[in-house]
Amino acid sequence: MKHLDFWFDPVSPYAYLAFERLPQVLEGVSYHVAYRPLLFAGLLRHWGQRGPAEIEPKRAWTFRQVAWLAHRHGIDLQTPASHPFNPLPLLRLALACGGHDGRPNRRVVEALFHHVWRGGGAEALDPVRLAALRERLAPEADPEGDDVKQSLRTATDAAIALGVFGVPTVVCDGRLYWGLDGLDLLRAAIDGDAWFERDAWDAAARPRPGVVR
């Protein structure tokens, strides 16, 4: 059985699409997924990047592309009224529902993604909607407790230490697969594609010094 770590932040439409696609992409594979919430903004700060929604032409392209991808794969997607938004309440709720190890199950993660991306275009942070979601999920811990807040910081730091720079990222057998399109690479690796058995994976990422800005 393959073990996968699925790093995500519900603010990302690509993470939502990958969450929905993962069971289809891995059909026929014996696997277990650990869902790992992290703060995407923390990754951006660490790696010195701006979010795609912070650059207007990139924001417009991103939402056109995710709308097309949702259409292509038959996934319901309704962009929330405001985006980007602060995902901290949702991330903390996920961890608070995660039991002793702070790792939420698929049912919890699905509820979070559907709250954001199947909410009829409503505000993801609407207090009434958030309260209803919290009541439905019935977290074991206080989402606003210091332990949960620290767990999110620790999880984000752990992801950075692994080299995670964006969401979604799936980690399998020590390799990182980023983005919705990274799922095809993941399946190929699990299926034993010969490309992964040679040095191609490492050779492709070999540094090639050039212009430094």
Image (tube, rainbow, N blue to C red):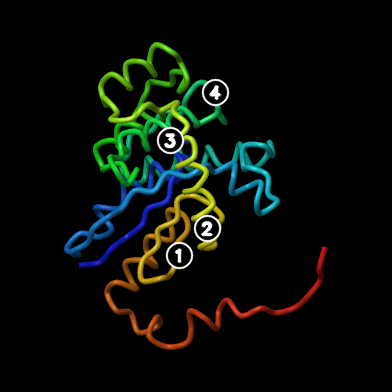
Q: CA distance from mark 1 to mark 4?
A: 30 Å
Residue under label 1, please give it: 176
Q: Which residue type does callout 3 highlight?
A: Val
In the rendered image, residue 57, in percent from the top left (x then y), is placed at 67, 39
The 10 Å Cα crowd at callout 1, few under 14, some 14 to 19, many 20 or more, is some
Looking at the image, tell me whether mark 1 or mark 3 is earlier in sequence order.
3
Q: Is residue 192 above or below residue 171?
A: below
Q: Which residue type does callout 2 highlight?
A: Val
At 37% across and 38% down in the image, what residue appears? Answer: 95
Of 41 and 16, the residue lying toward us: 41
Nearest to the eye among marks 2 and 4: give it: 2
Nearest to the eye among marks 4 and 3: give it: 3
In the rendered image, residue 167, in percent from the top left (x then y), is placed at 49, 49
Please tell me in which quadrant of the rendered image residue 107 appears. Answer: top left
Nearest to the eye among marks 1 and 3: give it: 3
Mark 2 vs 1: CB contact within 8 A: yes
Looking at the image, tell me whether mark 1 or mark 4 is earlier in sequence order.
4
SS under mark 4: loop
